Image (tube, rainbow, N blue to C red):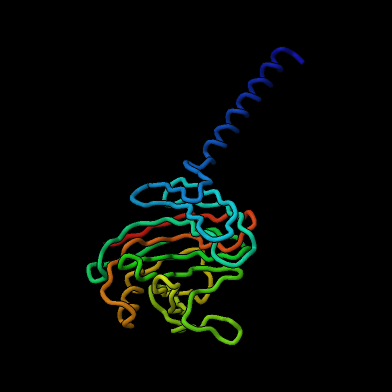
C-alpha cells in the first residue's frame, strides 16, 4: 500500500471514530441513575425513579428533560406494584381556583410485562388519589370497592366520557386514602387530558369537595417486567 493510500485510510478511520463517538454522546441521556429513589429536576418538574414495592428488582432511569425520560426495569413476575417511575409537578390550588388544568403525553411502552401508563393526582395532602389509566398490559387492575365472582373489579360508573376520553371509573381505598381510578376503555399511547374536567366530575358526584390539588404525576406503574424499556417521549402539564 502506498504512503498516500495509507494516510487516507488512517484519516478515514479517525473520522469514523470521531463520528461514532459523537453519535454515542448525542444518544446518551443527560442524566441516569440506578438508585431506587433517584430524582432529576428540570423546568419546574421532578422526574423520580420511585422503586418502592415489595420484591422489586433493578431499575435504571434516564432523562434528557422532564419531557423525555424513561426506565429499563427488571422486576420479577410476581404480584404487587414494584415501582412508579414518573414526572411530577406541583399545582397547589383548589379546584375552584383552577381556570384550567390540562396535560399532554406520548409514551412508548412494551407489549409484554404487567404495567399501566398512569396519571397519579394527589389532593388535600394525599387524602385523595385520582388515577388516570391511559394504557395497561398484563395482570394489573384498579382498586375498587367490590369484585365480581371471577375476581374482577366492579366499576362504580361505566363508559363515562369526560376530559377527552372514555373511562370505566372505580372507587375504593388502599387503606391509607381514597382512590378514584379512571381506566380508559381502550389503550392509547398519546393524547391530551382535561384534568380539571375530571376533578369537577368527581366533585359533582359528591365524592369530595373543593379539594386542593397538590402534585400531579405521570409515569409507569410497573408490576413485572423482564428487562423492559419504558419511554416518555413527550409530556407537559399546564395549569392556570
Which residue is at the front of the view, 238 or 113? 113
Tell me if 51 is positioned left or right of 102 in this view: right
Examine the rendered structure and indicate whether residue 24 appears above or below residue 236. above
Quadrant of the image containing the N terminus: top right
Picture quadrant of residue 98? bottom left
Which residue is at the front of the view, 56 or 6? 56
Which residue is at the front of the view, 228 or 152? 152
| The furthest residue to the right | 1
The image shows residue 16 at horizontal and vertical percentages of 62, 29
The image shows residue 96 at horizontal and vertical percentages of 23, 71
Quadrant of the image containing the C terminus: bottom left
Examine the rendered structure and indicate whether residue 179 appears above or below residue 118. below
The image shows residue 51 at horizontal and vertical percentages of 51, 55
Tell me if 58 is positioned left or right of 133 in this view: right
Residue visible at 48% across and 68% down?
134
The image shows residue 90 at horizontal and vertical percentages of 32, 58
Residue visible at 33% across and 73% down?
199
Residue visible at 32% across and 70% down?
196
Amino acid at each position: 500500500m502506498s504512503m498516500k493510500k495509507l494516510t487516507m485510510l488512517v484519516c478515514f478511520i479517525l473520522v469514523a471514530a470521531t463520528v461514532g463517538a459523537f453519535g454515542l454522546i448525542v444518544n446518551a441521556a443527560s442524566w441516569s441513575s440506578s438508585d431506587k429513589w433517584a430524582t432529576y429536576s428540570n423546568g419546574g418538574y421532578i422526574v423520580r425513579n420511585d422503586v418502592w414495592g415489595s420484591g422489586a428488582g433493578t431499575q435504571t432511569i434516564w432523562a434528557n428533560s422532564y419531557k423525555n425520560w424513561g426506565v429499563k426495569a427488571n422486576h420479577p413476575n410476581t404480584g404487587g406494584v414494584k415501582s412508579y417511575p414518573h414526572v411530577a409537578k406541583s399545582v397547589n390550588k383548589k379546584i375552584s381556583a383552577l381556570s384550567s388544568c390540562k396535560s399532554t403525553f406520548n409514551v412508548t411502552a412494551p407489549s409484554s410485562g404487567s404495567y399501566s401508563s398512569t396519571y397519579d393526582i394527589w389532593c388535600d395532602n394525599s387524602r385523595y388519589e385520582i388515577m388516570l389509566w391511559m394504557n395497561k398490559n398484563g395482570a394489573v387492575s384498579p382498586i375498587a370497592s367490590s369484585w365480581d365472582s371471577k375476581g374482577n373489579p366492579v366499576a362504580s360508573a361505566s363508559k363515562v366520557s369526560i376530559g377527552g376520553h372514555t373511562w370505566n371509573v372505580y372507587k375504593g381505598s388502599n387503606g391509607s386514602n381514597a382512590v378514584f381510578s379512571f381506566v380508559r376503555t381502550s389503550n392509547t399511547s398519546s393524547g391530551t387530558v382535561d384534568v380539571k374536567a375530571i376533578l369537577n366530575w368527581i366533585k359533582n358526584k359528591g365524592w369530595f369537595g373543593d379539594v386542593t390539588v397538590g402534585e400531579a404525576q405521570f409515569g409507569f406503574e410497573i408490576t413485572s417486567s423482564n428487562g423492559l424499556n419504558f419511554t416518555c417521549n413527550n409530556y407537559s402539564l399546564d395549569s392556570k
